[in-house]
Image: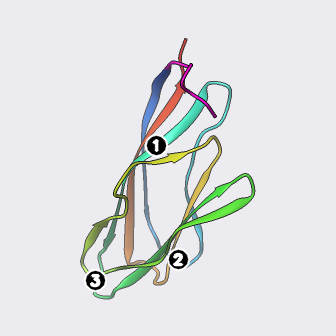
Amino acid sequence: MDLSSQRQYIQRIEVAHSILTTTDLTTFYTAPSGDDFTCAVIESILVCDHDNQQTKITFTVDNAGTTYTIFKEYNITAYDTEELLTRSMFLHQGDVVKIQADRAGNLTVYASIVEYGKGD
């Protein structure tokens, strides 16, 4: 999608957060879609292991039926908090971010997201 000729504006600021209470693959965030929406930008993803065991996290993005693995069984040290991103991550309309932990109840995940819409 070429956005260079379109004015963009911030539609809203979002926060996605979850305590992973199961080891199931869980939908964490879905980028909005529609005529007024163009993209979302994840600025930060913090993961905290609040238990006395190292926990692994898997982080994927589903786009139009294809799953892209961003982190696969990434180790989070016991009682540690890590920033997963070193740069902003862009999402298309309707992209679905999913997360999974290998231990239930150990991880808290918190993301800061900016959603952009079309301007005049």
Q: Which residue is drawn at 53% across and 17% down?
A: 119
Which residue in the protein does label 1 denote? 41
| Label 3 Cα neighbours within 10 Å, binned few <14 / some 14-19 / many ≥20 | some
Q: Residue at x 55, y 46 (%)?
A: 91
Q: 12 above or below 86? A: above
From mark 1 to mark 3, how far is it between C-alphas? 29 Å
| Label 1 Cα neighbours within 10 Å, binned few <14 / some 14-19 / many ≥20 | some
* Magenta-tinted stretch: 1-7
Which is closer to the viewer, label 2 or label 3? 3
Q: 34 above or below 23? A: above
From mark 1 to mark 2, how far is it between C-alphas? 27 Å
Question: Main SS of the magenta segment?
Answer: loop
In-image side of 44 versus 16 (left or right): left
The mark that comes first in sequence, 1 or 3, is 1
In-image side of 111 versus 66 (left or right): left
Which residue in the protein does label 3 denote? 78
- The amino acid on which the numbered mark 3 sits, given as a three-letter code, is Ala
Q: Residue at x 61, y 63 (%)?
A: 68
